[in-house]
Image (cartoon, rainbow, N blue to C red):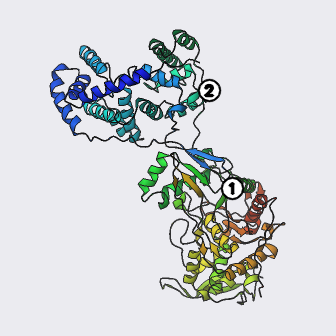
Amino acid sequence: MPSPRSRSSIRRTGRAAGLAVRLVAASSVAGVLTAGLALPALGSVGLAAKGAVSDFDNLPGDFTAPPLSQASTVYDADGGVIATVYERDRTVVPGDQISPLLKAALVDIEDNRFYQHGAVDLKGVLRAINKNAASGEISEGASTLTQQYVKNVFVDQAGDDPKAVQAAQAQTLGRKVKEMKYAIKLEETLSKDQILTNYLNITFFGEQAYGVEAAAQRYFSVHAKDLTLPQAALLAGLVQSPTGYDPVVNPRAAKERRDTVLDKMAEYGSVTRAQADEAIASPVTLNVSRPRQGCITAKDGQGFFCDYVHKVITGDPAFGATAAERQALWARGGLQIHTTLDPGTQRAVQKSVTDHVYATDKAAGAMTVVQPGTGKILAMGQSRPYGLGADQTLINLNVGKAMGGGMGFPTGSTFKPIVAAAALENGFTPAQSYLSPYSIPWPAMKNCEGGRYPQGGEVHNDESDLVGPFTMAPAMAKSVNTYFAALEGEVGLCTVVQTADRLGIAQQAGGTKLDAVPSMALGSNSLSPLDMASAYAAFAAHGTYCRPVAIASVSTADGKALTVPKAECGAALSAATADALTTMLKGVVQDGTGTRAGLDDRDSAGKTGTTNGSKQVWFVGYTAELAAATVVGDTDNQASLNGRKIGGKPVGSASGGTVAGPIWRDAIGAALKGTAPRPLAQVPLP
């Protein structure tokens, strides 16, 4: 293995030369040199030099290179990688993780006197002045690696703004003056080796690869520290023109440039002539790793959860006081994001959802699982894959519009337990009885603003023979609409809204406030599966509601731990209310509308929901370990599910119990397989 020549003596003389140049460049000579370099028409030198001196003296003295944008990694709860995401495909590595061959190659081809001169190469500038004056145009530059690094910093700061990038690269006197002064300041604080390392980490190498580690991975599928001589020479040659010398697109030009670098390495003694010739004789051999990044690369349906994590980091004040600060954090990258997603639960959910609802179906299915008592989001599954292709979508049906979702779905009768919770919290008991005939007029009600809804209109049960009287538990099991209309009328719309708010349902999925109208009891508000799963998790946790959380920890590129959003668990309901609801909801799966959702090996509880015309169907339920909400529906809220094929099977009359319930059962059953069952609460009911 060839090794570059020792440069220790060159570094020592370079510091002395650097001091001399700083003394010269800090005076008016800097203006003359820059003017001579940039303006070869000799008659203009004097006037340009005068302006350059003024520009040089007026520039701020401080130069701080910002943190480089890097790739961030999103992990599941077991440490598996969900996705790598980045604005720039870059992994910053220390100098000892970069091949010495590459360092030598870059110096030899770009600035062979790098370790001898200071920030500005006086000899190189004078040579360029003479050549440019003779040719009458800018035919040669004299930027040192330090100056090139400064320019690359400004280019990196410009991001994806074409005008800003153009300004950062413009061949103007003003930019040259700025570049020169900051290069001088930089060499006062950083060693040559540090500057070279920084240069190699910031530079664009083509094919979406920023920095040498990403470039080594992209072209050769190796780490930067493991580059061979031919590989190192090829990467060093790319710096001058990443597009022109792209070995993927222009292999002949890339080899010619690589061989030029090898010749320079032999000329300056970094390798022997024999080593260079051997490398020149070898073909350009690539092992390209195409960039695969972003949530679209996630497997097992994790793309939607990944996108949700992105929305949390760019939207939650825990990650920055302003939207601009949070976006800058995301763009800067280098984050290690450990999430709450449980891979086993995710696989179970995704398999069940996609087994029961196909991506090609007009209807779509979605399911969210949270952990009672902690708020941890364990899974998000969806029948349509995350993506932009046919039968794919970027809309996360599990969450609200603000977090990358849609407008939600009317919840149907899955909202009835919240009406019951409001009643139990305000002095009503499960013994509350109503006649509950097939049809009744809606009771008169008032909303929280004092608006009145007079008695009128009709509410009826799903079946003409479903008539009372009923107490609360059997009315819940059979989903008796007229019972809950009467209960809501006595409890009051505002009380129901306040109870929903304590359970995390403060607004509809689209961002508007809950519509406090009589039909609220029957699920007329559009909510998300995450909303409903989190609310029902409070029933499982004896009344403790936890704000759903997706992120366990985040650390920056330098290892600093960031504050993450907390679940903020607290009592939303009394334990007596929650346990009474659990007892009632166990009855739904035991002998009510949700029998097809029940589990055989452990207690489960839940509620079915079917909207008008069967456009959406729900099952929201829980065990002691998991709470989950499943919805299948027409995403445009236009067409009924009745009579369709869903998951390859014809559906006669669609309901929450027959369509959504089996999805919930199969997913939760698989997720909990092999675990010891824990009982749910059971209290005496009349």
The answer to whether 469 is drawn above or below residue 2 in the figure is: below
In which quadrant is the C terminus drawn? bottom right
Marks 2/1 in contact by CB < 8 Å: the verdict is no
Which label sits on residue 287?
Answer: 2
Q: Nearer the viewer, residue 579 or 525?
A: 579
- Disc 1, SS: loop
Q: Give the image quarter of residue 174.
A: top left
Mark 1: amino acid:
Asp
**Which is nearer the eye, 554 or 347?**
554
Q: Horizontal and vertical percent for residue 316?
A: 50, 60
Q: Residue 205 carries which label?
A: none
Return the residue found at the far right.
Answer: 600
Residue 53 image position (x, y, % from top left): 19, 32
What residue sits 23% from the left and 22% below the top? 36
Instruction: Out of 453 and 114, give the one closest to the viewer.
Output: 114
In the depicted structure, whether residue 478 falls above or below residue 237? below
**Above or below, comparing residue 56 to residue 454 in the picture:** above
Q: Where residue 503 appears, x then y in whole percent?
A: 60, 74
Residue 401 in percent (x, y) is at 53, 61
Q: In which quarter of the image is the N terminus?
A: top right
Residue that carries the numbered disc 1 in the rendered image: 342
